[in-house]
Image (cartoon, grey):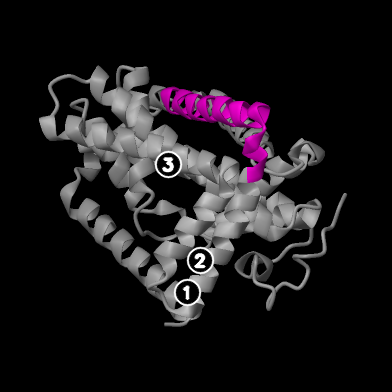
Amino acid sequence: MSLLKSKKFHSALGALVSIALILYFAFKLDWHEVGAQLLRVHYIVFVPMVLGIIVHMLLRAQRWRYFLPQGNRVGGQVLFDSIMLGALATFILPGRVGEIVRPYALSRKSSVPFPIGFASVVIERFFDLAAVLISFGVLTLLMPGMDPKIYVGAQILGTMALAILACIILGAFAPGVVRALSKSCCQVLPARFRETILRFVDQLIEATVVLKRPANLGMAVLFTALVWGSNYAVYYIYTYLVDVEPSMLLAVAVAIVLAFAVALPSTPGFIGVYQAGCIVGFNLFGYSEATGMTFAIVTHVFQYAVFVAYGGYLMLRDNLHMADLRGAGDPAIDSRKNTPIVT
């Protein structure tokens, strides 16, 4: 299967999932109640919401620095703008290309090559996954009376989180072991796939070198905690939009459920799965589906507005086009990716 067909398949699958969920909501929800709740939304909360999301994204930008070789030489504005441009791509383009657009944007504005930038994003995502799994484990301890299977699942996921971090650290301190294991595991694969995977492992190991420095590793862990703490704080602010009793526990639960939900195939911007995640999160605390949907609609539109507005500004400022974002990281489409535009 060609890469193009693979992209089309994943885009079609995402569209199918989103359409199925939209149709389900269309017939299942009490839209009169949703409309009534939308009229009662406390829109004044948008002011702290904007501040909260900016702080959250600034923390993400600062954390990225510690996943990059010589990240201290990259300007904070460049890191922030690259993340915001990636967020724009995630919200308007299919195929989850935001994770590719981000290192592409960084390579245009700094001396960081695209492959190294992309590997740093992969490592960052592993840290995020570990944070989500650990948070989920803690959440289950704070919510007694849940299905016992959920507690078992939380223990398993917590163990997975520690294993993920251990593998990343092993790649930094014992790259030879990781390379040997990768070669052994890939022996059964066709040569083309084996070479691709091993080349990616080499890039990943090269990116993890920065974590060999105790200061970098410590700051990466610290900023991961700050990033997710700020994310939970943002969702706590969000809870003031609707007529519920604001609580940090509710905010954390919704944010964690959403982290799992948006990993599912969907259209650009997570349409359908985002709404489903909000409804499930609110249902855990006994709130109606209409309340969850109201929360989802307002917060989702808000996120679209923030990322599209700032990302659109960046595209105008840097004379970028949609074709540039779609072809990010593809040397056949964008020959500039290895030619940094340092400002």
Near mark 1 (Cα within 10 A), the count class, few <14, some 14-19 or many ≥20, is few
| 115 on left or right of 269 | right
In the image, 268 versus 121, the foreground residue is 121
Q: Of helix, strand and loop, which one carries label 3?
A: helix
In the image, 268 versus 74, the foreground residue is 74
Q: Is residue 250 visible?
A: yes
Please check the rendered image and state whether residue 219 is part of the magenta-colored stretch, yes or no: yes
Amino acid found under the numbered disc labelled 2? Ile
Disc 2 versus disc 3: distance between alpha carbons? 18 Å
Disc 1 versus disc 3: distance between alpha carbons? 23 Å
Q: Looking at the magenta stretch, what is its main secondary structure?
A: helix
Q: Quadrant of residue 137?
A: top left
What label sits on residue 197 in the rendered view? 2
Look at the image and give the residue range highlighted in magenta: 209-237
Q: Read off the residue under disc 1.
A: 193
Q: Read off the residue under disc 3.
A: 164
Residue 336 at what x, y percent from top left? 78, 68
* Residue sitting at x 81%, y 39%: 73
Q: Is residue 309 visible?
A: no
Near mark 2 (Cα within 10 A), the count class, few <14, some 14-19 or many ≥20, is some
Residue 338 at what x, y percent from top left? 78, 65
Look at the numbered discs 2 and 1 and tell me whether their residues touch, using CB distance below 8 Å: yes
